[in-house]
Image (cartoon, grey):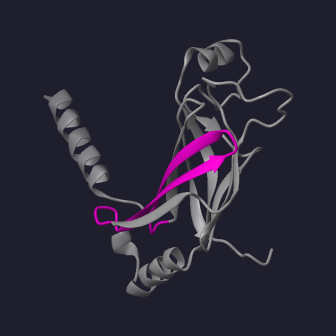
Amino acid sequence: MDYMKKTIWMIAVLTMMGCGSSSSVSELTPEEYKAFEDLVHNGNYEIRARWARPVSLNSLTALANAGLLAPEDTPSRINLLDNPGYLRVIGDSLSVYLPYYGDRQIGGGYNTLNNAIRFDGIPKKMELEKDEKSKGYRLKMTMDNNTETYTIAAKLVPNSFSTINVNSTHRSGISYSGDFQAFDTEK
C-alpha cells in the first residue's frame, strides 16, 4: 500500500509541475508585450544562437564516437558558447552568421576556411506573420549567397526565446535556439 501512495504522490507532483510555465506570455504586462511587438515591427533585433541542432547523420555520430565533440555536446545538440552565431534584422536587411555542423550534399568550393552560413544584404523574400498560439511571430526568409539558396524560418516569442530553422540547397538542415533581443545598430 505504501508503494501505491508514493506512486500517486509522484504522479500528482509531476502533473502540477507540468501545469506551471516559466516565462510565459501571460506573465508579461501589457506594456512589456507592446514593447515586444514594437521591437518586432521596427525591425532592429537579433537572435543570438546559443545551441545548434544539426540533423544527426553518420558523420556527426562518428565524430562523437571518436571523442571529438566537447563533453556537453551530442551529435544532435552542440553548444555555441565559444562560437556564437546570430541572425540580425536591420530594417529590410539581414546579417547572418550561423556556424554550420552537418553534411554538404554539394561541394562548397576550394580553400574555404569558413563553412558557416553567412549572408549580408536584402533577402529575396521576407515575411512576418503573427503566431496566435505562442503570441509571438514567425519570420520566413529566402536568401541567396552566390551559389547557395537558404530558406530560413525563425520563431520570435515574447519571453525572448527564439528558434531558427535553416534549409539549404547544398547542405543538410539545421536548427538553432537562442535569445531574442534588440540590436543596437550604433555598435
Q: Which residues are magenta?
A: 131-159
For residue 29, what is the image quadrant? bottom left
- View extreme (bottom): residue: 31
Left or right: 38, with 133 as reference point: right
At x 57% / y 74%, what residue is drawn? 43
At x 77% / y 44%, what residue is drawn? 82
Rendered-image quadrant of the C terminus: bottom right
The answer to whether residue 122 is above or below residue 116 is below
| Residue 137 colored in magenta in the image | yes
- View extreme (left): residue: 1
In percent of width and height, residue 57 lies at: 55, 19
At x 55% / y 29%, what residue is drawn? 172
| Of the pair 1 and 75, the residue shown nearer to us | 75
In percent of width and height, residue 64 lies at: 65, 18
The answer to whether residue 13 is above or below residue 43 is above
| Of the pair 99 and 62, the residue shown nearer to us | 99
Rendered-image quadrant of the N terminus: top left
Instruction: Give the main secondary structure of the magenta stretch.
Output: strand
In percent of width and height, residue 170 lies at: 60, 31
In percent of width and height, residue 184 lies at: 71, 76
Left or right: 156, with 99 as reference point: left
| Residue 145 colored in magenta in the image | yes
For residue 149, what is the image quadrant? top right
Count how many numbered circles sit on residues in the image. Answer: 0
